[in-house]
Image: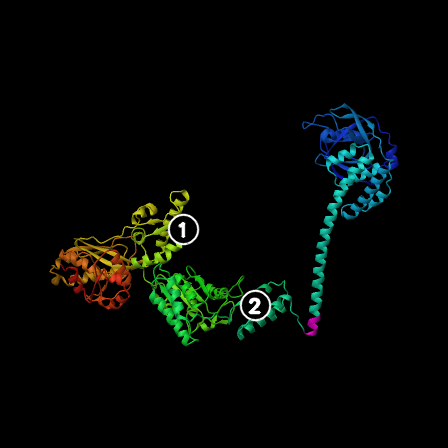
Amino acid sequence: MTDESHSSDSPPATAPPEDTEQGLVAVDVPDVLPLLPLEGTVLFPYTMSSLAIRDSGYISLTEDVTAGDRLVVFVPAAATEEPDGHMVEPFPVGCVGRIVKMIRFPDETVRVLTRGIRRVRIDEVITAEPSPCVRISEMEDTGTDTVEAEAVARNAQIMFNEIIGLSPHLPDELRVALLNIYDYGRLADLIADTIGLAYEEKLQVLAAEDVQVRLSIVNDAMARELNVLRLGNEIQAKVNTAFAEHQREQLLREQLRAIQEQLGEEPDTPDIAELRQKMADADLPKEAREAAERELDRLRRMHPAAADYNVSRTYVEWLLDMPWQTCTEDRLDIRKARRILDADHYDLDLVKDRILEHLAVMQLKTDGNSPVLCFVGPPGVGKTSLGQSIARAMGREFVRISLGGIRDEAEIRGHRRTYVSALPGRILQGIRKAKTANPVFMLDEIDKLGTDFRGDPGSALLEVLDPQQNNAFSDHYLEVSFDLSRVMFITTANLLDPIPPALLDRMEVIRIPGYTRLDKRHIARRFLIPRQLETNGLSKSQLAIKPTAVDGIVSQYTMEAGVRNLEREIGRVCRKHARRIVEGDADPAVRASIGVAELADYLGPRKVFPDLPPKTPGVGIATGLAWTSAGGETLQIEVNALPGTGKLTLTGSLGDVMKESAQIALSYVRSRHEALGVDDKRFSEQDFHIHVPAGATPKDGPSAGIAIACALASLATDRPVRPGLAMTGEISLRGRVLPIGGLKEKLLAAARAKLTTVIIPAQNSSDLEDIPEEIRSKLTVVQVTDAASVLDVAFAT
């Protein structure tokens, strides 16, 4: 088998003298010649081809032919042998060729240079193996004398001449060869061998005796080739033109730059002209304008392809986009602001009064600083949504960023421009987003700021939240002072303890306690139920949730200070009913009413089983009250005595402060053994074990001191604490009862637990003003100043 590697119309310099056009015509071709198959190529008369031969049998055949008259019949291989190598009926047409040169290569292959002589027909296969040999007869060209053949030939010459001019791979010598060809058949063969015809088309050209048929085939192929070449040249011309224009533009710019440098002038590019126009339209303070002009001058001297060009341009755009002097007009109508706050939130009178006070001050003194408020309360009480209501009431834009998990100081102050992709901090990013210099800016979850090697973002907030300093806040990126005194900052937190004292000192703390059951009922009726009905595609005429059902959800399916889970459960009820309507189990025209009895069908079994104090408490058990980030809770404090040496054991995941309170309570009760009628040996001959259930929950704080003392006194005197009693207060070593925090949440927890009496420190009496009447009517609050009074109330019959 042979492969083609090169073809050309020009004879090689090593061709023998007789290998010319006249010589080829005069060659006497025998009737019987050896056959050599061509793989994937076709040899045409008067064309040169370089062929590689790999088969050992054909190599031997080639050597024999080269030693003789060098004539071989080249036939397309696709029709001459089967995959197993055996000869079959050959392609009926081939080309007699002369082997001009043979070269043997080290990989045992042979490459031959051959030239086609004439087209022949295969009449008979004389021998098939080992050396194929066939009988042939010459084919004569027909149809060369007609006017149609001449027209087709001229058209072929024109198209082929154009292809030579468009194709970079065809040599110009072909034009000379084309001018010297007068035989239309040779013209068709030359074109077929030169352009990229398909293999099947080449076979058709080889087999056609009619020259007009051959020319028609090559004309069709040349028409396709011309379309491809013309399109490619158009594309290349466009690319070259664009590249030349770019080079010309760059050259002219460099020349213009040189001329302007000689004249001492530097014109603005379109980008810089646009920025300069924006700077003229912007109301910039003096410092910002100077910084922008300084950076624009630097940009003008910088090449647009320079690495720092985009950095400088971004910096100028930030300077121009900041709302330096743009402020929204405050809505100072206090009555309208009150209506908006009442429409958005139930209760929260303390917060609403503070906002209205600020609006009143702004009416009297327009240049006053905005307050920095800190809303502290358990999750789900509406701290974040309250900030949105404040912005709506004041007619300002609202911006919110979450500080939870931020550990990088650059998040607040921004990165310096030496860093890649540097940007201002989140404060200035939020103000740019608001497009006003006096938005309501909420810093959410300020108690969850972190600190690591990248800096302390809490310390970076000191300047932001200080009304005496934030009128000249400096961001590391802009390096231009920005006035933050017009911004109303609102922060939110669940706990105050994690907030740094210096940062807390700059904020006005407003506590938002948990909601009572009555509060949750009103909130559900006014806000939650209408919102969930709309969210789930229902109307009031299709579903009604009774107040008793809301109470049932609160007590049986949620345990929280806020209303977030309450809204989730109401949403579940709405979704269940929507599904029943779609599945045909409920009539959309009939209003379904949901009461307590139907809750199990919609929400499943009861989820919340509160740890209620026993109605008949035993000896050594007292009920305390605790405050958590989720609201108030009741604590069952249990004390037991064991034979020992007076050692105290504390369990229940207690913190250090609570452990110290237990030690103080034990010392106080032991010091009162005579008044309690207890032998002192009982304290020295027994060990005391104090346990607070829910051991997986960490507990700390001093407010359980009097409850621990009551439990120890109950165990020592064998007298149970009166039922329905809870207490909260810190105890001192001498028995004084000290004030505590979170009284409202603790009283709410006592009311939920259906307790009747609560003992509190007398110094917390002022906190009772914030307790809703609904709660005060259910509880008897006893105020005490010393632990002796606590024991008198606890053991009273």
Q: x, y (%) of residue 605?
A: 31, 46
**Could you tell me the amino acid type at mark 1?**
Leu
Q: Regarding mark 1 in the picture, which secondary structure is present there? A: loop
Kindly identify which residue carries mark 1.
538
Vertical placement of residue 164 versus 299, above or below: above
Q: Quadrant of the N terminus?
A: top right
Kindly tell me whether residue 453 is visible in this rendering: no
User: In the rendered image, which quarter is residue 137 located in?
Assistant: top right
Q: Which residues are magenta?
A: 259-264
The answer for how far apart the CA atoms under marks 1 and 2 are is 52 Å
Q: Nearer the viewer, residue 385 or 706?
A: 385
Q: Amino acid at mark 2?
A: Val
| Of the pair 795 and 146, the residue shown nearer to us | 146
According to the image, label 2 marks what residue?
316
Characterize the magenta stretch by its predominant secondary structure. Answer: helix
> Tag count in the figure?
2
Q: Position of residue 440 (x, y in %)?
A: 44, 66
Q: Percent x, y for residue 606?
A: 30, 48
- Quick check: 661 left or right of 395? left
Q: Is residue 604 above or below residue 632?
A: above
Q: Nearer the viewer, mark 1 or mark 2?
A: 1
Q: Quadrant of residue 300?
A: bottom right
**Left or right of 4, for residue 416:** left
